Image (cartoon, helix red, strand yellow):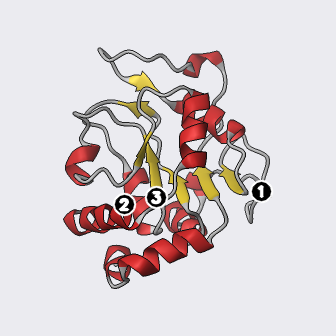
Amino acid sequence: LSFQRILKLSKREILEHWNNLPQSIAFIQEKRLDPSHEYVFDQTKPIRLSKFRSELATNIKIDRVLIEGKGWPSQSLNPKQVIRQELPDWHLDKLSKLNKKFRYVSALENVHHPNYVTEKIFDAYASMSIPIYYARKDHFAYKLAQKSSFLNLYGLTIEESVASIEAFQPTIEFVERYMEDIRHM
């Protein structure tokens, strides 16, 4: 239903929506900064991304950043630090927080494996946001989003990732790819 709603908009309306939002990003994820979640770039095995995405969330310095989840100080309507999975409908809660409110949504998985995809990338698209993802060229995400309509941080350091997000300016051509990928999904 969300995809159909987005496809009813024109390319210009989507671009204007993103450009009229403050430079903003949402991270809804557990905070994992301890050494057991250390990021190691190794193309031969799954790459743990939990610490990478937590470090990204703490290092990004754009206008509006939502960071929410177990271990983070509360910045939202969840002041009691209720564990998301204990909510009556944690997924609906997440989607309602994201819906058309952020230019970017972190869709970074806990781990990078070529065939591993969860709801995260779909949620970013469904909320009419630009997904922040991490995928090498043979990753299954490219079968879903064939036009590469997400910001890919694969192989980048935290500093390079922050710079990439902060510098990105969506164009009509990007919106075309975004809409084609939503149609495909």
Mark 2 residue type: Phe
> Which label is found at residue 130?
3
The part of the image, by quadrant, that contains residue 153 is: top left
Report x, y in % for residue 149.
Answer: 34, 55
Query: Residue 174 — which label?
Result: 2
Front disc: 2 or 3: 2
Percent position of residue 24, x then y:
64, 59
Residue 164: in sight, yes or no?
yes
Cα gap from disc 3 to disc 1, whole angstroms = 22 Å
Left or right: residue 175 versus residue 16 is left
Q: How far apart are the alpha carbons under marks 1 and 2? A: 31 Å
Secondary structure of residue under mark 3: strand
> Where does label 1 land, which residue?
75
Q: Amino acid at mark 1?
A: Gln
In the image: residue 104, left or right of residue 77: left
- Can residue 96 be seen here? The reply is no
Q: Would you say 117 lies left or right of 84 here?
A: left
Above or below residue 57? Residue 13 is below
Q: Residues within 10 Å of mark 1 (few under 14, many from 20)?
A: few
First-in-chain label (1 vs 2):
1
Residue 43 location (% of width, % of height): 32, 17
Q: Earlier in the sequence, mark 3 or mark 1?
A: 1
Q: Secondary structure under badge 1?
A: loop
